[in-house]
Each structure stands twice: as C-alpha cells, then as structure tokens.
Image: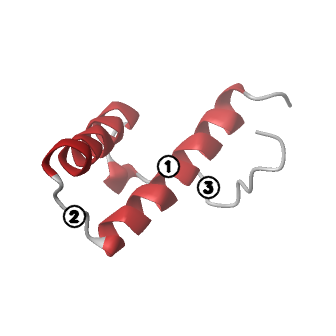
Amino acid sequence: MKGFPCDAGALPRQSGSGARFCNQVERMRLLADYTGEEIDPDRARWVVERAAAFLCAIKDAFGPD
C-alpha cells in the first residue's frame, strides 16, 4: 500500500466490525451488479471513505513499522 494516504485514522466504531462492513458492501455490489439497482452517490462515497479507513487500519495493524 505504498503511497496510500492513511490519514483517515482507525475504523470508526459506528461503521461496525470489519466483517459487517464487508457484508454491507458486498450486498450493495450484488444489488448493483445483478438487479441494476442504483446506489445512492452519498452511500457510495461513504463506502469508499470507510474502505480507505479500513485499509489504513489493516496497514497500521499489520504493516511494517
């Protein structure tokens, strides 16, 4: 994740667990891919922001010092 901007901090508690977040995103992807349901732009933006925070939390926990 070299060069990935990790200034978002740790994954906020209100986002739920990592597994819960991944399940929510997977559900949105399946709906969009297989039903053609449009995803609200604000919801999509939220997902991208939370995904960035999740990746940063993983990097902080398991990345090199």
- Residue 38: x, y in percent? 21, 64
As drawn, 51 above or below 41: above
Of the numbered discs 1 and 2, the one sitting upstream in the chain is 2
User: Helix or strand or loop: what does disc 2 sit on?
Assistant: loop
User: Helix or strand or loop: what does disc 1 sit on?
Assistant: helix
Give the residue displayed 74% in from the left and 56% down from the top. 5
Q: Pick the residue in front: 33 or 56.
A: 33
Residue named by callout 1? 51
Give the residue displayed 71% in from the left and 54% down from the top. 6
Of the numbered discs 1 and 3, the one sitting upstream in the chain is 3
How crowded pointer 2 is (Cα within 10 Å; few <14, some 14-19, many 20+) is rated as few
Q: What numbered label is drawn on residue 9?
A: 3
Q: Nearer the viewer, mark 1 or mark 2?
A: 2
How crowded pointer 1 is (Cα within 10 Å; few <14, some 14-19, many 20+) is rated as some
- Residue 14: x, y in percent? 33, 55
Identify the image quadrant of the C terminus. top right
How crowded pointer 3 is (Cα within 10 Å; few <14, some 14-19, many 20+) is rated as few
Number of numbered tags placed on the structure image? 3
Identify the image quadrant of the N terminus. top right
Tell me which amino acid carries mark 1: Ala
Q: Specify the quadrant of the image occupied by residue 62.
A: top right
Q: CA distance from mark 1 to mark 3?
A: 12 Å
- Residue 24: x, y in percent? 26, 44
Residue named by callout 2? 38
Q: Specify the quadrant of the image occupied by residue 43.
A: bottom left
Q: Nearer the viewer, mark 1 or mark 3?
A: 1
Q: Pick the residue in front: 23 or 14.
A: 23
As drawn, 54 above or below 38: above
